[in-house]
Amino acid sequence: MSTETDTRTEDLVKLFEEKVKGPIETYLDVCVHCGLCADACHAYVGTGDVDQIPSARAQELEKVYKRYFTRLGRVAPWLVGAEDLDEEVLDRLQKMAYQCTLCRRCALYCPFGIDNALMVAAIRALLADGGMVPAALWEHTDTAYVTGNTLGISDEVFLDRIEWFEEELRDEVDDDEATIPLDREGARILFVPTPIQIMRFPSVIISTAKIFYAVGEDWTMSTRRFDGTNFGLFSGEEEKRDEMAQRLVDEVERLGARVLVVSECGHSYWVMKVAAESWLGKPLSFEVKNIVEVIAEYISEGRLNLDPSVNKDVVTYHDPCNLSRKGGLIEEPRVCLEAATESFVEMTPSGEHAWCCGGGGGVITIPEYDEVRLASGQPKADQIRESGAEVVATACDNCKLQLIELAEHNGLDVSVVGVVDLVAQALILDEDKK
């Protein structure tokens, strides 16, 4: 073995020691490889690949842990199944970590409550520090870090799109004075969309503006921060992850908003609602809500006049893992859909037990994993078919992209739409709002 290889291994072992600690060490000790997590994992059920079993990832980590951090593993590794942290092992870990969607469904079924997503996050952080992030995912993360958004949208393009959205809004509400406010200091709500909504799913932003118009909401958008996503979470680049979160915090505070409302994006909600305070080491000075949560509040308060007969097709709802299982927003989207559609049906299982669509965790951005990604979405495709629905509603861009592909791949005759769009379609504006 060359000196260069020895040095790299030493560096990686040091990184391993930094990343695999605390609860992760406990998980490695506790996991008995019973395999109960296997049938809970969409990737294993969809592909049949044993490397996708969550406990298999724990076992890979355990082999390396034993090799460098247990006495017997250092002296006689073959006796305890310990392995060197070499390139072959790193390649295996990379596939295991970046093909996982971090959906945490397996944790619901583990008798010991082992959080596989936490272990995967540690592996990704190790690989990121070692320069082993898949190229496409690294590029998305770097683009977001450098330009401020994952698609590298310029300020000029953003303003041009907002101008178009505003024209559409005025047509929708029949009011030439209707606006999409920008950089308005002191507004109650700062609404932050995603780049993919700006460029591919603009109806989400237009529909949100229409609903805000209907209730007379005090809101604004930012010309500095118009990307709520955080790809540092996906790549495992923790410094970029924390910086992206801090930038959004700084913008909310600059504008003096009391509520940060993130759009239909599962992970951006989870990042800012659940994780940001821990990452940044301080409490947030504002509330964090998802747009479907806000709309559900409007409905419950009787502030929206909706005609569900406008949406006559049979509609079902896909629970984004970051909103439901990890974020606790289960009833809110259903409040919206039951009020805005004529025929709403549930998939089985749903809510916190819903199957992951297979596109989360950044997996959808990694083209070399496309085949695995589509196969791992099979349980969700089967659910959709069995529901008999004509429309699949969801509240996450990643999920929309994956569901659209799954529908095409599996011959499902369904359309995929946002919850916000269905509410906006059913909205009847009061005469005094026009």
Image (tube, grey):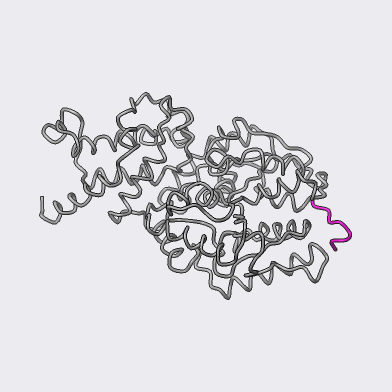
Which residue is found at the position 58% from the left and 45% from the top? 403
In magenta stretch: residue 48: no
Picture layout, residue 25 above or below residue 361: above
Where is 70 relative to 285, above or below?
above
| Residue 324 point in image, percent of width and height | 57, 40
Q: Quadrant of residue 195?
A: bottom right
The residue at the point 47 percent across, 37 percent down is 104
Quadrant where the C terminus is found in the figure:
bottom right
Image-based side of 210 in relation to 46, left or right: right
**Residue at (56, 37) in percent of width and height:** 380
Residue furthest bottom as drawn: 156
Choose top left, top right, bottom left or bottom right for residue 224.
bottom right
User: 106 or 313: which is nearer to us?
Assistant: 106
The x, y position of residue 162, in whole percent, is: 65, 69
- Residue ranking furthest to the right: 431
Q: How many marks?
A: 0
> Is residue 12 toward the left or the right of residue 240 in the image?
left
Estimate the x, y position of residue 395 in percent, counting from the top left: 62, 48
Kindly report the secondary structure that dominates the magenta region of the rendered protein.
loop
As drawn, is 98 to the left or to the right of 192? left
On screen, residue 128 versus residue 11, left or right, reads right
The percent position of residue 136, horizontal first and vertical second, equals 41, 58
Please tell me which residue lies in front, 57 or 12.
12
The magenta stretch is: 427-434
